[in-house]
Image (spheres, rainbow, N blue to C red):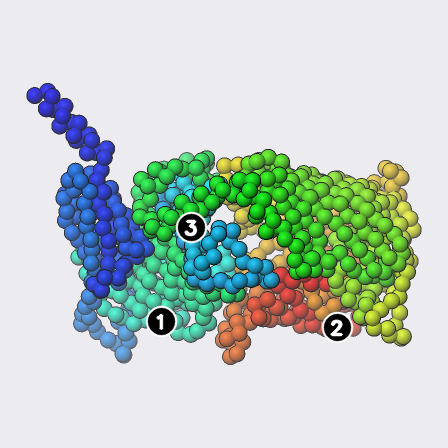
């Protein structure tokens, strides 16, 4: 008898510890697969999700269960099964959702969908805040596939370094398991428990478990899809943007659910199209299938479909079960598509958080999160991998191991280090040795050769040699050497120099730089004049905008991040400054009525510097309150915050050290920020104030200078540059001066209503630049611009108003990601 009891106990224990597999497929009545269908055990918090092929797998202990299968747009189906000691197969064939059209009262011809949407809008805020806090475990799988790609991109051969030349291939594949914690209204945190990236043994992958809530008025999907966001179909003002059509109703667990078709009223507005299902009387979202296209204001991708399915979770509240995003990208000859699925489970609707739980880390990858064994994934993932996905993991993980071999590293280095004409001329040459973890990069010819009236033809050749010090994959420890040699063929001066930078820091990045030698400096050491622009101006327009001096120098600088959004820096530099004069007047377009101006900053200064020495010490602090971080096991990365960035700095010119002839002190403080007004655009500003405290001995390079631009039609760096004044026009040694740079990017607001322009997707920008000098100049520079011209061009029309001086105006053009730093 006792042996029988033991036997029964062991059988029960074995059955509990060894659950059986319930597998099957989900298809529609035509036999087509239904991707990412939801599979639930009725009455229990157990479930899974079908994969892209409609296949699912669920571990269940022996017993009887009712299995519920759901897919948006199809009729929910229940099946009762008994699990024994063997694996069980269960298939579902779902029918298109049969919609009923109950009798409705139509007032003045209004579609009944509007009454339902109005009720949903009235309950929007309630449902948005329904769950004050919760935790959930989220499984995320992301896949991006290529259908086609060009042979070359910007002159470079496309090579994915995987030996696969097929056009149709998996470009990216990852999966992650994370705990998502929320405490409204301000706190959320993601703790990644496991992550895996195909082909990256040390990769951390993409973990984006956040719920895209359509109870918000404005929907933000990613960071760069659209700065304006997208208007929810049940936003407070949704009736101004959408039309609605009542498609009918279906019943589920005794609830009536209305299917509403969502139709944008106008093109080129940030709007969805598709379907949203609303629970009658509760007026909450049951599920949705919504689509964004290019006409919705997206820039980076062609279309994005989003599906969500909610489910009851007790206490009259609902939680999201599945969220799937389907992007399609067609750009520069690349044709890609994919899916990113989130499966939410193990909800805790009344968690207890410690006071220190929500800190400045919003995303944390736990130790060994990217080192989980295959068995872990087989037991944990709620989706069955497709065969092609499983093969991709095996193939690319094996390739990742192969990539560590000397033979492979050498072969890849030979390919990457191949020298081409475009590298020589434009992009620069880079030579890597992965075994030794070193890189050598050389400047392109367009940056090496230049011309100015002081040195004539200039060759400024340099290289940067970098080496990672340890073998940790993401370690910050590295050292780099940058030797440079500058030679002017007209003045026959040779200026060699060397800088060495050591980067380190476990959690936060720190850097130490030591530099010295001989070089040519602009009088404004921030280098406001671009080399290409000054060369063109000298050779074509007969203007020498580059004002320079020569110096022997030596210096040291150090920067350190200490967390909480704080970074401080310190530097000291000694210069033995020597004047330079024009030595050539060669031009390609000789104009006899013009001659080059002298090589010192006009109009403030009417004489060049005399040789002198300067020893300067600078300290600064940067602080962004509320800075958030992504935390990896070995480092932290700042992702900014909603608060402004504050900067403060102090500079002291010290006499009598290394024969220094200068003696002054000055300070500066600044604040900058970007406000995203979503539908109404982005407002950006940068304000600065400062001045001299003491000024016993000041030389031209020590003055307060501003970046100007009168040398060229091209421009850039808008929030730090005046567009219609010469570079040294307002240079001063005032005790108080301030600048302000303000601009508002409408991002399609207003212009999306103008014929032709709305089709071209040109966007309006307005703003102003301003300058105030105590007991000196006052200047204001309002402008209006169109950007996103051919996706990369911005054109400004600018007015300039100076106190006691004639007004001015001009046109400036900038090219996105261009090397035309030509001001």
The mark closer to the camera, 1 or 3, is 3
Residue 721 horizontal side relative to residue 227, left or right: right
Which picture quadrant has residue 764? bottom right
Residue name at image x 23 percent, y 33 percent = 17
Residue 86 horizontal side relative to residue 680, left or right: left
Q: CA distance from mark 3 to mark 2?
A: 56 Å
Q: CA distance from mark 1 to mark 3?
A: 34 Å
Disc on the earlier residue, 3 or 2:
3
- Give residue 808's mark: 2
Packing grade of label 1 (10 A; few <14, some 14-19, many >=20) is some
| Above or below 381: residue 789 | below
> For numbered disc 1, what is the local secondary structure?
strand
Q: Nearer the viewer, residue 351 or 518?
A: 518
Residue 305 horizontal side relative to residue 751, left or right: left
Image quarter of the C terminus:
bottom right
Packing grade of label 2 (10 A; few <14, some 14-19, many >=20) is few
Residue name at image x 39 percent, y 59 percent = 326
Q: CA distance from mark 2 to mark 1?
A: 48 Å
| Above or below 319: residue 469 | above
Residue tagged by mark 1?
Answer: 263
């Amino acid at each position: 008898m006792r042996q029988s009891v033991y036997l029964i106990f062991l059988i029960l224990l074995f059955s509990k510890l060894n659950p059986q597999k319930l597998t099957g497929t989900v298809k529609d009545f035509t036999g087509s697969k239904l991707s990412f269908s939801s599979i639930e055990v009725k009455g229990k918090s157990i479930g899974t999700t079908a994969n892209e092929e409609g296949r699912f797998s669920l571990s269940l202990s022996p017993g009887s269960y009712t299995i519920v299968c759901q897919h948006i747009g199809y009729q929910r189906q229940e099946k009762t099964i008994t699990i024994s000691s063997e694996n069980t197969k269960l298939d579902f064939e779902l029918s298109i959702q049969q919609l009923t059209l109950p009798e409705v009262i139509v007032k003045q011809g209004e579609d009944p969908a509007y009454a339902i949407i109005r009720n949903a809008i009235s309950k929007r805020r309630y449902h948005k805040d329904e769950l004050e806090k919760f935790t959930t475990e989220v499984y995320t799988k992301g896949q991006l596939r290529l259908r086609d790609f060009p042979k070359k991109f910007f002159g470079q051969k496309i090579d994915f370094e995987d030996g696969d030349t097929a056009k149709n291939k998996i470009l990216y594949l990852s999966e992650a398991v994370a705990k998502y914690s929320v405490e409204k209204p301000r706190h959320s945190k993601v703790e990644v428990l496991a992550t895996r990236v195909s082909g990256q043994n040390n990769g951390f992958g993409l973990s984006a478990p956040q719920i895209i809530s359509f109870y918000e008025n404005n929907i933000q999907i990613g960071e760069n899809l659209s700065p304006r966001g997208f208007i929810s179909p049940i936003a407070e003002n949704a009736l101004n943007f959408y039309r609605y059509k009542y498609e009918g109703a279906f019943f589920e667990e005794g609830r009536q659910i209305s299917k509403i078709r969502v139709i944008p009223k106008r093109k080129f507005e940030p709007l969805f199209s598709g379907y949203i299902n609303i629970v009658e009387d509760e007026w909450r979202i049951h599920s949705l299938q919504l689509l964004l296209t290019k006409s919705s204001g997206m820039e980076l991708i062609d279309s994005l479909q989003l599906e969500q399915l909610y489910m009851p979770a007790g206490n009259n509240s609902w939680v999201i079960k599945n969220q799937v995003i389907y992007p399609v990208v067609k750009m520069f000859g690349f044709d890609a598509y994919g899916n990113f699925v989130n499966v939410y489970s193990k909800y805790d609707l009344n968690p207890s958080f410690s006071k220190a739980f929500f800190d400045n880390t919003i995303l944390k990858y736990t130790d060994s999160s990217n080192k989980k064994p295959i068995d872990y994934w087989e037991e944990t993932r709620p989706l069955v991998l497709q065969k092609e996905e499983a093969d991709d993991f095996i193939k690319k993980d094996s390739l990742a191991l192969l990539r560590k071999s000397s033979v492979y590293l050498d072969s890849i280095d030979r390919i990457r280090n191949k020298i081409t004409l475009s590298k020589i001329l434009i992009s620069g040459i880079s030579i890597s040795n992965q075994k030794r973890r070193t890189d050598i990069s050389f400047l392109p010819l367009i940056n090496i050769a230049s011309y100015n009236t002081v040195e004539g033809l200039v060759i400024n050749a340099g290289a940067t040699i970098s080496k990672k010090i340890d073998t940790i994959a993401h370690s910050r420890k590295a050292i780099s050497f940058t030797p440079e040699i500058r030679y002017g063929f007209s003045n026959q001066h040779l200026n060699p120099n060397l800088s060495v930078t050591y980067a380190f820091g476990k959690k936060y990045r720190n850097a130490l730089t030591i530099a010295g030698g001989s070089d040519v400096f602009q009088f404004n050491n921030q280098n406001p004049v671009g080399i290409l622009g000054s060369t063109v101006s000298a050779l074509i327009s007969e203007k020498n905008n580059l004002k320079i001096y020569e110096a022997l120098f030596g210096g040291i600088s150090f920067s350190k991040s200490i967390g909480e959004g704080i970074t401080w820096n310190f530097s000291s530099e000694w210069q033995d400054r020597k004047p330079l004069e024009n030595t050539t007047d060669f031009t390609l377009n000789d104009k006899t009525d013009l001659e080059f101006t002298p090589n010192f900053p006009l109009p403030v200064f009417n004489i060049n510097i005399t040789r002198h020495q300067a020893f300067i010490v600078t300290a600064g602090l940067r602080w962004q309150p509320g800075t958030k971080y992504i935390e990896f096991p070995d480092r932290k990365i700042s992702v900014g915050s909603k608060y402004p960035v504050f900067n403060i700095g102090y500079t002291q010119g010290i006499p009598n050290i290394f024969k220094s002839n200068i003696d002054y002190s000055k300070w500066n403080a600044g604040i900058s920020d970007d406000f995203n007004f979503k539908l109404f655009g982005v407002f950006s500003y940068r304000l600065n104030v400062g001045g001299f405290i003491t000024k016993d001995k000041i030389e031209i390079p020590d003055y307060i200078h501003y970046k100007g631009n009168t040398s060229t039609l091209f421009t850039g760096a808008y929030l730090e540059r005046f567009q219609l004044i010469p570079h040294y026009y307002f240079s001063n040694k005032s005790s108080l001066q301030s600048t302000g740079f303000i601009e508002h990017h409408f991002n399609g607001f207003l212009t999306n209503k103008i014929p032709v322009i709305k089709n071209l997707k040109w966007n309006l920008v307005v703003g102003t630049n301003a300058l105030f000098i105590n007991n000196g100049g006052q200047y204001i520079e309002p402008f209006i611009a169109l950007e996103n011209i051919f996706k990369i061009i911005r054109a400004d029309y600018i007015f300039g108003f100076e106190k006691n001086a004639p007004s001015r105006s001009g046109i400036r053009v900038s090219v996105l990601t261009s090397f035309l730093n030509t001001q």
